[in-house]
Amino acid sequence: MTLHLAVALDGAGWHPAAWRAEGARPDRLFTPGYWAGLVAEAERGLLDFVTFEDALGLQSSRLNEPDGRLDQVRGRLDAVLIASRVAPLTSRIGLVPTTGTTHTEPFHVAIGIASLDHVSRGRAGWRPQISGHPDHVAHFGRRPPFPPQDYSGDRDPVFGEHVLGLFAEAADAVEVVRRLWDSWEDDAEIRDVATGRFVDRDKLHHIDFRGEWFSVKGPSITPRSPQGQPPVTSLAHDTLSYEFAARSSDVVYVTPRDREDAAAIVESVRAAEAAVGRTEPPLRIFADLVVFLDSRDAYGRKARLDDLDGAELKSAELDGAELDWDAHVFTGTPEELAGLLLEWREAGLEGFRLRPGQLPHDLVAITRALVPALQNAGAFRTAYETVDLRGRLGLARPASRYAA
Amino acid sequence: MTKQIHLAAHFPGVNNTTVWSDPASGSQIDFDSFRHLAQTAERGKFDFFFLAEGLRLREAKGRIHDLDVMGRPESLTVLSALAAVTTHLGLAATVNSTFNEPYEVARRLATLDHLSGGRAAWNVVTSFDAFTGENFRRGGFLAEADRYTRAKEFLQTARELWDSWASDAVAADPEAGRFLRPGGVTPFRHRGRHFDISGLFNVPRGPQGHPVIIQAGDSDEGREFAASSADVIFSRHSKLEEGRAFYRDVKRRLAAYGRRPEELKILPAVTYVLGDTEAEAAERAVEIRRAQVGPQTAIYFLEAVWGRDLSGYDPDGPLPDVEPDLDEGVSKGHAAFRRDRGELVAKWRALAEEKNLSIRELAIEVSAPQTFIGTPRSVADEIDHFVQADAADGFIFVPHLTPGGLDDLVDKVVPLLQEKGVFRADYTGPTLRDHLGLAPRTQDGIEETS
């Protein structure tokens, strides 16, 4: 069975000094050509999908406030719009933007992702993400102040309680979005000239969602999209977020440190599925890895970037890590990475989401060296079999939940 | 001096202007329809392509209205995709200022401006509708009287966010190790009646500085808002005399804001029908209006005004003899007919009696006729006349067919306007501000003059 392989795109790459490396294009980060080039390269490598990071605040090396740094990439374009911008220029690769669940209206997200699915002919996915950043709350002025984030071992109880609420709200947001995606049945549009009816209104549904944070009436303004339900993907590090994934997602990204850890995490994810009584197909479990790939001395290249940034990028222990800096950092040859992926897969992982340390360098190493190595091992596709992303992930296209 | 005409294209709307029963009518949601219309507009060197928005499906009598084309994408998402298949065409998104927040809208519009190389426009619309609010966190929170104060403050806040990044804030200088220039990004702080926000914006300033701002309101408040803040007015005044009156009124208001008349373009929404002869065009115009107002649509049209169920009446028979129920509104999510329904009913009855009209004939008679009907030559002359007579600076064309509804306009009328020397033969700059003859928006809010 083919391994699933995704790439996480963000700025100049995941190393904070990546923009300063040779071959980087820091002056192009906010141009469409930059993104189109990266996604086309990922598609040449037959990757399952790319994800686009996003947030409703400026990047910061500090957890709870801006850091004032001028020596790292700052500024980000809207992820849904980047994904849509590259959709007509590609034909197979999945496009999975991040949007927030804390400040963004679920209704807007639902129509945005459905529209991306229409534009890309069934290649859209979605990564919902909570925002616990206290400073981002003031960008909206709609919610009471948030407590400081604290991911340490003995988590501040006020923050712990707060995060529970953010995840519960996120689960409601995903539920609303999924209902809205189903609110037009596939055959709602009838264009019946004899009766003058454009739609069969019995096939359009109010979703009537009522929750603690919001109520949404529906139906969507956007007809059901090619995939019906674009795959929902989420990043998870602990029981709370595994349970969120088990309730809400189709794909979960986890962050094991090694093969044994991967096995333990897979077990925890399956336990979370049981705990929430998941009835959907089992979660597709992907491991996230930050990668620096060279035929020789990837370690040296990464060390030079560390020097430039003034800090070592390393696989942080989960406790104390900011959520984005949680994944195992791999440095080595593409062939070595191929070996590691095949070994970790034995722990029950279906795929990997690779975070290139430096763009385009590490993306090109993935598509032109890692992929051939996996293909030689008979572990990766040699052509795209499907257009739509659900099909690629082995997910059937569901009928609308409202269909009689 | 001969004025240059500005042309824009509106994707066919979710109302009965759009004819879906025609065999040539294609999908209203497939990306190819958007691509075809946008590329046709660009072939015609149009200024911009316009997408409308409505955040709740229309309902009547508690049920979803099923007679018109419906189902739309999120406008910014589709425009971003269209940026990939066009090179010069402006891309205008309608985005509601009631059920959004400035930080998000400002960053999405700035993003579209980056991803299109400076072609983004924002049609700022307002809503006070509790009905639409049922799809959003805050519900129907805004009083009608406040919709413009919020819209105005929303736009002002968005401008503050865009201005919080200097145009040269991104240094991207690896040698110096400076991604940002010192002082390039300024914290924002907005404290007002509707928004109390602060922090750091996270999208660099777009190629146009600010996207082009479009405004469609027609009330005194709406006109004042446009005069103070908009670059383009999407006007409804498509008849010559009322167009001139509106044009004079709005342009006169600009001076109070230190703006020159040419800094605000007035573009009425218009429809058109072409024929090889005047008679053929007139005949096609009638056919199209009959297709737009089918029997069920005629009944629906009257129900919205009568405020009661009229499904028992024959669309080809006389007007209903029952009196309107003025307390009961049956049509929701529909902008028209909110006021003076009693007066309207009296007027329509008189008209129907005078011309001996059935329900459907009356509905056709009183619903908007096409603006320009004629041969390509006569339509081109009329368009030019309207603009030279100061009834407009150009037009937003609303085709009645998806996706082919602009084809003959672009193939037959645009070349005649170009021949007359009143419409560009080609784009002269890359940005929408270039097409509209508007200066880029500088950080201090002063438009550069040249």
Image (tube, coloured by chain):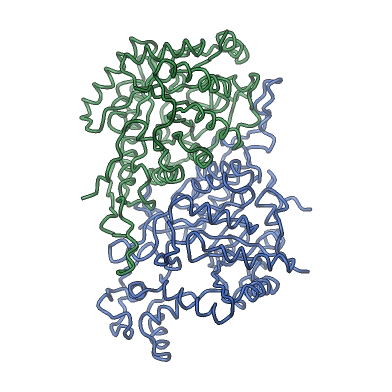
The answer to whether B236 appears left or right of B15 in the picture is right
x and y, in percent, of residue A46 in the image: 46, 28
The correct choice, above or below, for A176 with respect to B130 in the image is above
The correct choice, above or below, for B144 with respect to B285 in the image is above
The answer to whether B332 appears left or right of B396 in the picture is left
Q: Residue furthest bottom?
A: B354
Image quarter of residue A388: top left
The answer to whether B427 appears left or right of B198 in the picture is right
x and y, in percent, of residue A61 in the image: 53, 21
The answer to whether B210 appears left or right of A150 in the picture is right
x and y, in percent, of residue B202 in the image: 56, 35
Who is closer to the viewer here, A231 or A245? Answer: A231
Q: Is residue A36 visible?
A: yes
Who is closer to the viewer here, B394 or B348? Answer: B394
Q: Is residue B229 visible?
A: no
x and y, in percent, of residue B183 in the image: 67, 31
The correct choice, above or below, for A263 with respect to A140 in the image is above
Residue drawn at (56%, 62%), measured in percent from left and top?
A: B407
Which chain is assigned blue? B
Colour of the chain lettered A: green
